[in-house]
Image (tube, rainbow, N blue to C red):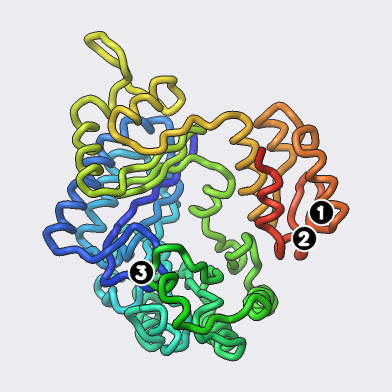
Amino acid sequence: MRNLSIYIHIPFCVRKCLYCDFLSGPASVGEVGNYVNLLLREIKEQSVFYGDHRVVSIFFGGGTPSLLPARETGRILEGVRDGFFVAEDAEITIECNPGTVTAQKLRDYITSGINRLSIGLQSTDDEELARIGRIHSYSDFLETYTAAREAGFRNINIDLMAGLPGQGMASYTKTLERVAALSPEHISAYSLILEEGTTLYVNQDAYTFPDEEEDREMYELTGRYLAEAGFHRYEISNYAKEGQECRHNKVYWRRGDYAGFGLGASSMVQNVRWKNPEAHMAYADCVEKMGHGGGGRALGSGSAPCIARPQDKSFAEMLRRTGRCEVQELTAEEQMEEFMFLGLRLTEGVDLKAFLRNFGKAAEDIYGRQIRSFLEQGFLERAGQRLRLTSRGIDVSNAVFAAFLF
């Protein structure tokens, strides 16, 4: 059986953070219920495609998925289990923000089979949190973290951000110290990116941000400090205790199959990529078309049409017919590009044997010039049959990735 990861998008939040450009926003109780019903219909209709897949991870992202009542989250998981073969040891993650879960809700998560919690902290400095529009304080986070441990969670991620307005090395260092002292299993640490159209982007002149040198120092400090605290970096911005790497995210970086459900969710299965509509009405129409023969059957005539599979030529056409966006059948060149720049995000690097096995050509035959140049400059290094970024290469990773695009 082929492995499959499932992403479920919950587009609701209390209010949008000032830096956020994700597909999310506030919603009424009625809107939440209607959305969950649509989501369950989509999951049911799409499950017919994946009879030969085993689900190895499920990820509730958003938005703030923890805003959903626990019973609704449980309904969604039941829908997935009814339609898909879910491995007994599947990693099941839900993102949450401090202040949006109770002790009972966390216990309900455990009961429903959720075994990994990802908490959006960003900073332990309350003034920094307020400047970026977070709805919680550091004490709110500590209360949530403690309740999660007491509920039985043994796999917790904490999200952090560097480069925040008004943030300095002293406050960022304190954040690292406080979080590492809690000993979570996983830490994701990203630098703030000012995305065009966000409130923080529009009003950036009203804030003082760390300069480029300070931002680099924060990044380097993150790696050093977390390594000393027992976390190994396995991806450019992700750190984990031994054996606690996020299995779901590694599927993306290794180009595994993943199916996304919900508003604006993206999927990539057997080198066909697509995205659900971002507008609610268009998404509802898309789900409706799935339920009237457009989603679960192959195209063509006949009294007993067969089920369309991702490997069938009719699959991409069916996706377009049901209103999916950005349907793309990846060429061999595009597959090789992704194999290289996504694989290089992982500290283990690109598996050169796997490249040859997948594409029938050696990576050096396709990217010989780039590989030689980056090896000579000290941005890449060989480790057995792997090609990986050096510490110098991580500093200029975007430029390295861009060089592998045709």
* Extreme residue toward the front, this view: 205
Q: Residue 390 shows which numbered tag?
A: 2
Residue 325 position within the rendered picture, expressed as x and y whole percent measured from the top left? 36, 38
Q: Mark 3 or mark 2: which is in front?
A: 2
- Residue at 33 percent across and 46 percent down: it is 261
Mark 3–mark 1 Cα distance, whole angstroms, equals: 38 Å
179 vs 308, left or right, is right
Q: Which residue is mark 1?
A: 381
Compare residues 337 and 105 and report the one nearer the observer. 337
Nearer to us in this view, 232 or 380: 380
Q: Residue furthest right?
A: 376
Q: Residue at x 64, y 75 (%)?
A: 212
The residue at the point 65 percent across, 66 percent down is 233
Q: Disc 2 versus disc 1: distance between alpha carbons? A: 6 Å
* In the rendered image, the vertical position of residue 94 relative to residue 339, given as above or below: below
Q: Residues within 10 Å of mark 2 (few under 14, many from 20)?
A: some
Could you tell me residue 4's position as x and y percent? 45, 41
Is label 3 in contact with label 1 (beta carbons under 8 Å)? no
Q: Is residue 227 visible?
A: no
Provide residue 169's location: percent of width, then percent of height: 61, 87
Task: Indicate the amino acid at tag 3.
Answer: Cys
> In terms of sequence position, does the residue under pointer 3 or pointer 2 come before the other?
3
State the residue at coordinates (44%, 55%): 91
Are dots 2 and 1 in contact, CB under 8 Å?
Answer: yes
Determine the CA span between mark 3 and mark 2: 34 Å
